[in-house]
Amino acid sequence: METSAPLWLWITFAAIVLASLFVDFVVLKKQGAHDIGVKEALNWSLIWIGLSFVFNALLWWAVKDHTGSSELANTKSLEFLTGYLIEKSLAVDNIFVFLMIFTYFAVPNAYQKRVLMIGIIGAIVLRTVMILVGGWLLSEFHWVLYVFGAFLVLTGIKMWWAAGKEPDLNNNPALRLLRKWMPVSQNYDGERFWTVENGVKIATPLLMVISLIALTDVIFAVDSIPAIFAITSDPFIVLTSNVFAILGLRAMYFLLAAVADKFHLLNYGLAVILMFIGAKMSLIDIYKMPVTVSLGVVVGILAITMVLSVRRAPGKADT
């Protein structure tokens, strides 16, 4: 797995992630359990997006300094931006599922941020492992590209078919398995995952929620990670674009939760993006699409979907 990123940039990336998580945890603990409004969510979203762009500028400078090639630096910077945008876009679908889980379990808004914070840490660890394994597979077995491509096309078709339909959480096999495996209290006990009832230690609904959030992220990681490998095979670009998109997931959730109804067609756009990326990956040995074209297509699909969502009523759009 070759990468053009120097060692010091790997170390800098790790330091930024650890510092970001530390700051987020300190702020989280200082604020305590409280509702997160649109203004606060927007401010944090802008901070995370700004940090991602600053890192991309650092990436450009590091690659140019390390290789002496401005052209390669431009390519790597565009790959990061495209991968980041794809991950950020696919995270929207993830957020809608989180919203459904929180609504189903009637999780108070004040408790949701802790669940999301823990979920983000788990997602970073999980995706790091999956990216390293995926990168090794691609370097050893080129034909895996075609498997990833076909999988993304099929996932996009499935997402299109499921768009606009309400998921049935009652019949979710993971939820039924969790309920059989652990006794769960009917009531919340603050932000605790365990409580004591009649002298017996049992789980609170919040533990059930964090378990479902973790399982959901495993499913979405299987979809989204191959999508970035269609843009670049550089493990550093794949990992960093993925992690920076995840870091802003908590703020993005509270922001989108307030305007979810306005972008009811977004899942259709995400389905098209997945099918496009899958087709691009499957045809990579026939035609290697420039990164700028890939970025333009993704941005264009998202823009069209969002404009149509605003202009068309949900009832008409989902029929």
Image: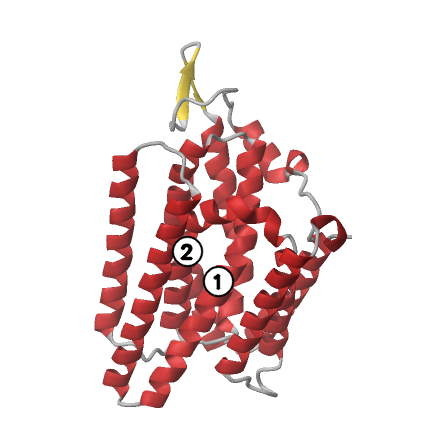
Q: Which mark is residue 56?
A: none
Front residue (pair 230, 98):
98
Q: Is residue 216 left or right of residue 310?
A: left
Q: Quadrant of the image for the N terminus? A: bottom left
Q: Residue furthest front?
A: 311
Q: Residue furthest left?
A: 8
Q: Secondary structure at mark 2?
A: helix
Q: Which mark is residue 87?
A: 1
Front residue (pair 43, 139):
43
Residue at the disc numbered 2: 246
> Label 1 amino acid?
Glu
Q: How many other residues sit within 10 Å of disc 2, few (<14), some (14-19) or many (≥20)?
A: many
Looking at the image, which residue is at 61% across and 33% down?
176
Residue 127 lies, in percent from the top left, at 43, 57
Disc nearer the start of the sequence (2/1)? 1
Q: Residue furthest right?
A: 319
Looking at the image, which residue is at 30% across and 90% down?
69
Looking at the image, which residue is at 52% across and 44% down?
258
Is residue 245 at least partly visible in the picture? yes
> Label 2 amino acid?
Ile
Front residue (pair 318, 294):
318
Residue 306 lies, in percent from the top left, at 60, 61
Disc 2 from disc 1: Cα separation: 8 Å
In contact (CB < 8 Å): disc 2 and disc 1: yes
Looking at the image, which residue is at 54% across and 81% down?
293
Residue 273 lies, in percent from the top left, at 60, 67
Q: Secondary structure at mark 1?
A: helix
